[in-house]
Image (cartoon, rainbow, N blue to C red):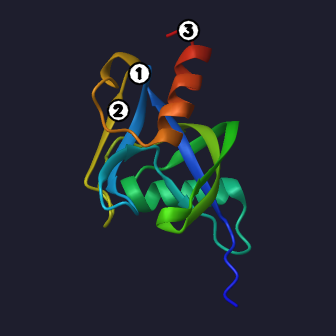
Amino acid sequence: MDRKLPKVIVSALVEKDNKILLVKEVLESGKEYWIVPGGTVEYGETLVDAVKRELKEETNLDIDVTDFVDFKEVIRTQFNYHTVIFFFLAKPLNEKLALGDKILDARFFGKEELDGLNIVDSARWILEKYFSNNGQ
């Protein structure tokens, strides 16, 4: 019997000028979504090391992780998807964005710019939490 296990995912809310970095990817559903950048934790890797590596791979940004924000479990059995996502707050240490292989676009967004974007549910949840906690 094939036993499936949830994936451990890390994501970074990268702050710049009161905006947060989002990346656009094609997800398991086959549709394009804006998400908080991040990815899978590798065996033997700390959560912080993983989020730094993932941000570098996806966006070319080096980051300073400043805080842990929250976590969210996401289960979408129809797409064979079960993750636990750990969200961190971070500051960029360099400015030059360069897109990784799976990334279609990457931009910083303010709260007022999120309306109308196709944002994955977990990203919308953490962005609402972030902007409400930061008085926006």
Outermost residue toward the top? 135
How far apart, in angstroms, are the residues tagged by discs 1 and 2? 9 Å
| Mark closest to the chain's N terminus, 1 or 3 | 1
Question: Which is more N-terminal, label 2 or label 1?
Answer: 1
Which residue type does callout 3 highlight? Answer: Gly
Q: Residue at x 29, y 55 (%)?
A: 31
Which residue ends up furthest to the bottom in the rendered image?
1
Circles 1 and 2 in contact, beta carbons < 8 Å: yes
Q: Which residue is mark 3?
A: 135
Disc 1: which residue: 17
Classify mark 1: residues with Cα within 10 Å, few (<14), some (14-19) or many (20+): few
Q: Which amino acid type is shown beneath numbered disc 1? A: Asp
Q: Amino acid at mark 2?
A: Phe
Local SS, label 1: loop
Residue 72: percent from the left, percent from the top? 66, 44
* Image x and y of residue 66, in percent: 66, 35
The answer to whether residue 86 is above or below residue 111 is below
Q: Is residue 122 left or right of residue 85?
A: left
Q: Position of residue 106 (x, y in %)?
A: 31, 45
